[in-house]
Image (cartoon, rainbow, N blue to C red):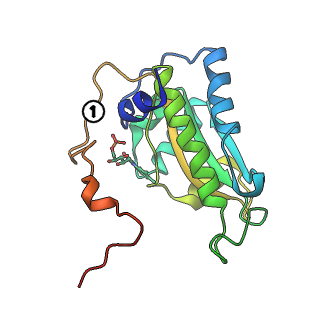
């Protein structure tokens, strides 16, 4: 599968089988995270691989009760170190969130190639997840994803998943669109 196929095939998976992920596959998933680019190559991130079933259930509860997350054998929690990250994006911005998000996106695409499913999770209580996973105050939890083999019957979200804005809506050449 080439990159474009992986990009187009990836969909949010919200139903998982408990089938374990083989060690070699998990190793490739770790490399997908590890090889991601980051501003100044600072790599201001840490990834917690939550495998304990009770902990997975508690993390899912702290994620607005998205309990299907806990069925996957692993929940990947992307943490970032804002204090260490590049702080001058565009002259002022901290790159920590962006760096961690790029890494997590690498994972979502690499997972497709292995037949694994993922789903970005942004709806979670950071204080609650931090407490559960013993994450220090200064470390930010950016996002999470369950990682596992899709259950046979994947639940399709009622929103129009997969639908994308038209090219005309999101691209312009040379200049930002000028509306008179
Ligand atoms: C930053 C971010 C946060 C998200 N948080 C959630 C979430 O908490 N729960 C969920 O079910 N989906 C979540 N999603 C998945 C989006 O709903 C999904 O990516 C979007 O509808 C497009 O569908 P697709 O991933 O199948 O292409 C999130 C996606 C992103 C990028």
* Up-down relation of residue 165 to residue 109 (above or below): below
Total numbered labels placed on residues in the image = 1
* Up-down relation of residue 7 to residue 42 (above or below): above
From the top left corner, tell me how far across and down residue 168 is, in percent: 25, 58
Q: Which residue is drawn at 50% across and 36% down?
A: 108
Closer-to-camera residue (21/137): 21
The quarter holding residue 21 reads top right
One can see residue 38 in this view: yes
**Residue ID for mark 1:** 155
From the top left corner, tell me how far across and down residue 121 is, in percent: 46, 48
One can see residue 58 in this view: no
Please identify the residue farthest to the front as the structure is shown. 174
Q: How crowded is mark 1: few (under 14 residues within 10 Å), some or many (20 or more)?
A: some
Q: Residue at x 62, y 73 (%)?
A: 90
Q: Residue at x 67, y 31 (%)?
A: 30
* Up-down relation of residue 152 to residue 59 (above or below): above
């Amino acid at each position: 599968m080439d990159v474009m196929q992986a990009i187009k095939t990836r969909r949010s998976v919200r139903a998982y089988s408990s089938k374990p992920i083989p060690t070699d596959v998990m190793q490739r998933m770790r490399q997908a995270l590890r090889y991601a680019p980051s501003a100044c190559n600072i790599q201001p991130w840490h990834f917690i691989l939550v495998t304990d079933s009770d902990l997975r259930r508690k993390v899912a509860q702290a994620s607005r009760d998205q309990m299907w997350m806990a069925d996957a054998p692993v929940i990947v929690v992307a943490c970032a170190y804002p204090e260490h990250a590049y702080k001058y994006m565009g002259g002022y911005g901290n790159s920590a969130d962006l760096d961690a998000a790029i890494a997590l996106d690498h994972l979502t695409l690499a997972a497709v190639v292995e037949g694994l499913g993922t789903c970005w999770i942004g709806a979670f209580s950071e204080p609650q997840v931090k407490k559960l996973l013993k994450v220090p105050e200064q470390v930010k939890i950016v996002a999470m994803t369950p990682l596992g083999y899709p259950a046979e019957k994947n639940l399709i979200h009622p929103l129009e998943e997969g639908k994308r804005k038209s090219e005309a809506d999101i691209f312009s050449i040379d200049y930002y669109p000028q509306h008179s």
